Amino acid sequence: MKILPCSRRAKKHNRADSASSNTLDPNHLTLSKRVDSWLCKTTQVLYSSDLDEIIVIGYMRRDENYQINTYDGKNFTLHNSVEAHKAAIYKAILIPKGLLFLVTISADQTMKIWSLSGLSLVSQIRMNYIPQDICVNPNIPAVILVGKSYHIKSYCPKTGSLLGEMITESVNGFSSCIYLSEKNVVAAGVYDQQVIHFIDCRTGLTINMVKAENHVDSIIGMQLIQSQYLVAASVDLICVWDIQNLSQPKMHLQIELPLKKVSSFHVNEEYDAIFVTTRTPVIDIYRLSDGTFMKFLPTKMQKCSSLTFAHGTRQLLVADNAEGAISVFTYSDKMKLSCQTCNIF
C-alpha cells in the first residue's frame, strides 16, 4: 500500500472512491459482543497477542481507584483484576518481544511496570513531574517516558532502573512520543503545541521539527506506518507525515475534524483504514491512503474512547468512556446474509 500525496486537505465527508481488494469494507464489521468491565472515565483497551488477552483500564467507582482487568480473548471471561493507581491513568502500553509486561503512567506522578502473568507489580518509579506518554524501544528493550519536563528518560522494563536521560530544547515538555527504530530517533509532540521534535537518541539533539499549521492543541497520539509514515492526531486534526528523510519531512495527508474532538485513533495499514473516536456513540472511519471519509459505525455506546484492532481474531475493540463497556466488532471479508442493521441495533 502506498500513501498518496495530496495537494489539498481531506474533507470530512468526501465520497470514497471504489475500494481496492485490500481496503476495509465497513459493512463487513458487525457487533458480535459487549463486555461490561464497569471501568469508566479514562477507559483504555489493549490486546495481547502473546496471551490472547484483552486488557481494560479505567476507574472503578465502587473502589474509587483506577484498575486493570484482563479477559480471555475468546470467551471474554475475567482473568485478573488489580488496583493500579489512585489518579487517572494517562497511558498504558505492552512491551513486545514476548516479555509480557504492561506499563502504566498516571497523574499520581508514577510509572508502574506490571507482569501480565497474574498482574503482579514488577516496579514503580516516582517522578517530580506529571508523565504524559510512553513508548517502547524494542531493540534494548526500553520504556521511553515524556511529560511536563524537558527531560526524556528511558527505563529497563525488567528492573525499572534508569537506562538513560536526554535533556531537550523544549521548555514546555512533551505530550506524546513514539520511537523510530530504524533511525534511533524519538518523535515527541511538544506540550500545548502541534509541533513534533525529532530527537536523536545518541546525542539528545533535535534533528528537525514539523508543525501542523497554526493549531495550538497538544498532539494526543502518534502511530508509525511502514517505518516511513508518521500519523499524528490532535483533538481536531489528523496528519500523515512522510519521514523517510528526516532532514526534509513532508506532509502527505491532513484530515480536519472541526466539529468534533478526537479522543483516540487507530491506523490499520492492512485494510487502509483510520478508526477515530470522538466520545460520541459512533466510530468515524477514514481511508488512510487519501483521507476520504468512509462511514460512521454505530456502537450502542455513549462515549467511545480507546480502540484497538486484534489482528489474530480480526476484531475491533472499542471502550466506552461513560459506562466502561467494551464493544467487540468482528470483521469478515464476506458479507453475511443477515441484516447488518439488526446486528448493530
Image (tube, rainbow, N blue to C red):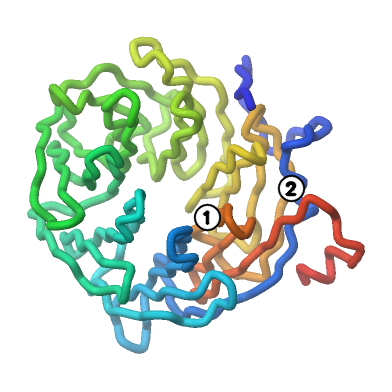
Residue beneath label 1, please?
308
Mark nearer the viewer, 1 or 2: 1
Quadrant where the image shows the N terminus? top right
State the image coordinates of residue 309 (x, y, percent, origin top left).
Answer: 56, 54
Q: Left or right of 337: which side holds 314? A: left
Residue placed most toward the observer, 335 or 31: 335
Q: Secondary structure at mark 1?
A: strand
Task: Reply above or below: 112 against 61.
Answer: above
Residue beneath label 2, please?
295
- Residue furthest out toward the right: 337
Q: Left or right of 95: which side holds 329? A: right
The quarter of the displayed image where residue 243 is located? top left
> Which residue type does callout 1 highlight?
Thr
The quarter of the displayed image where residue 48 is located? bottom left
> Which residue type does callout 2 highlight?
Lys
Q: Left or right of 230: which side holds 344? A: right
- Few, some or many C-alpha atoms within 10 Å of disc 1 (few <14, some 14-19, many ≥20)? many
Task: Identify the residue shown where x is 43% and y is 69%.
Answer: 56
State the image coordinates of residue 95 (x, y, percent, origin top left).
Answer: 32, 53
Q: Secondary structure at mark 2?
A: strand
- Few, some or many C-alpha atoms within 10 Å of disc 2 (few <14, some 14-19, many ≥20)? some
